[in-house]
Amino acid sequence: MELTFISSTPGEVTESEALDAYSQAVITVAERLSPSVANLRVSRRVRGGRLLEGGGSAVVVTPDGFMLTSAHVVARTDGGRASFVDGRELDFTVVGSDPLSDLAVLRADGGGLHPAELGDAEALRVGQLVVAIGNPHGFNGSVTAGVVSALGRSLPTRSGANVRVVDNVIQTDAALNPGNSGGALADGRARVVGINTAVAGIGLGLAVPINAATRQIIGALMSEGRFRRAYLGIAGGPRPLPPRLARKLGRNGGVEIVQVVEGGPADRAGMRPEDLIVELDGTPIEGMDELQRVVVSELIGHAVRAKVIREGREQELELIPGELDA
């Protein structure tokens, strides 16, 4: 019996060559980024006065010690200890934390660190290679790889009575485990495009994106130790517009008010449950995403116009947003 061996056609990439290219991409990212990812050890007091030990990861963003992590990793603590793959161990303090974006900025007591390059998650595509670097279960510098499995996911966050949705969260199948939180999710050029935050299920992880909105939060945490948000004093949800109004306004939906906080800015402005917000400060509002993006610190204490639909008719109201106490 004669055996026939089939060779690849000229110019065709063999399976081994493809695997080598994939492996080389992951190796390059790991070598460039691992020195920038710290293993965090934190202690926090819990109910009964007990001291609870915890951990996570952080990403160095400046040579003089600023690091980025998840807010839940450093909740209820002022600092801890950070270790690096080169063997260094440094104390760190919490500079600022924003639970509603699940981001926090730390400062390590030392210089000469290796900052990571921050990328832009808006340029990601589903199926694109991503590499997660962190410290799952305390194992320093662990690397996993996968692809972007979905974009545009939402992540609900809470701070006290305040609930917010983080927009455009990255979903990946790169394996994430306890201790990966606060670590880097990087693209194939070793640029950090997300901060790993949660495990959504078997084989599914979520990362808070690095984009224009989160860069603004990071900058405020570094300079002021907090991120300010305007407060309207409502609870609401998306609702489709009636066809006639949709045609007239050139949009399909708005935000229906389901609850108005007594004595809050919306209450003082005369807003009512069942009002449908379609515009705020000159910006069309079709859903909660647009409303959250408009309600920024610049509106605090300033009179703005809100256009609402009440009983089928348009009305304009003036309100003065307060500051959200997170």
Image (tube, rainbow, N blue to C red):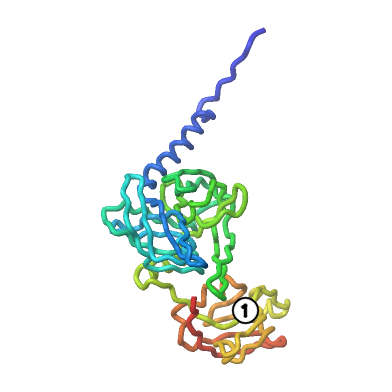
With 52 as the anchor, is 221 left or right in this view?
Answer: left
Q: Residue 4: percent from the left, percent from the top?
A: 62, 14
Look at the image and tell me in which quarter the N terminus lies: top right
The residue shown at (57%, 72%) is 163
The residue shown at (57%, 90%) is 263
Q: Residue 266: percent from the left, percent from the top?
A: 58, 87
With 312 as the anchor, is 111 left or right in this view?
Answer: left
Q: Nearer the viewer, residue 299 or 76?
A: 76
Location of residue 222 with respect to 2 vertically, above or below? below
Identify which amino acid the numbered label 1 is placed on: Ala
How many numbered tags mark residues here? 1
Q: Nearer the viewer, residue 260 or 286?
A: 260
The residue shown at (46%, 83%) is 300
Q: Residue 62: percent from the left, percent from the top?
A: 32, 58
Res 31 → quadrant: top left
**Residue under circle 1?**
235
Location of residue 120 with respect to 247 vertically, above or below? above
Residue lying furthest top? 1
Mark 1: few/some/many CA within 10 Å (<14, 14-19, 20+) = some
Location of residue 82 with respect to 247 vertically, above or below? above
The residue shown at (49%, 84%) is 322
Res 165 → quadrant: bottom right
Q: Residue 214: percent from the left, percent from the top?
A: 45, 65
Mark 1: which secondary structure?
A: strand
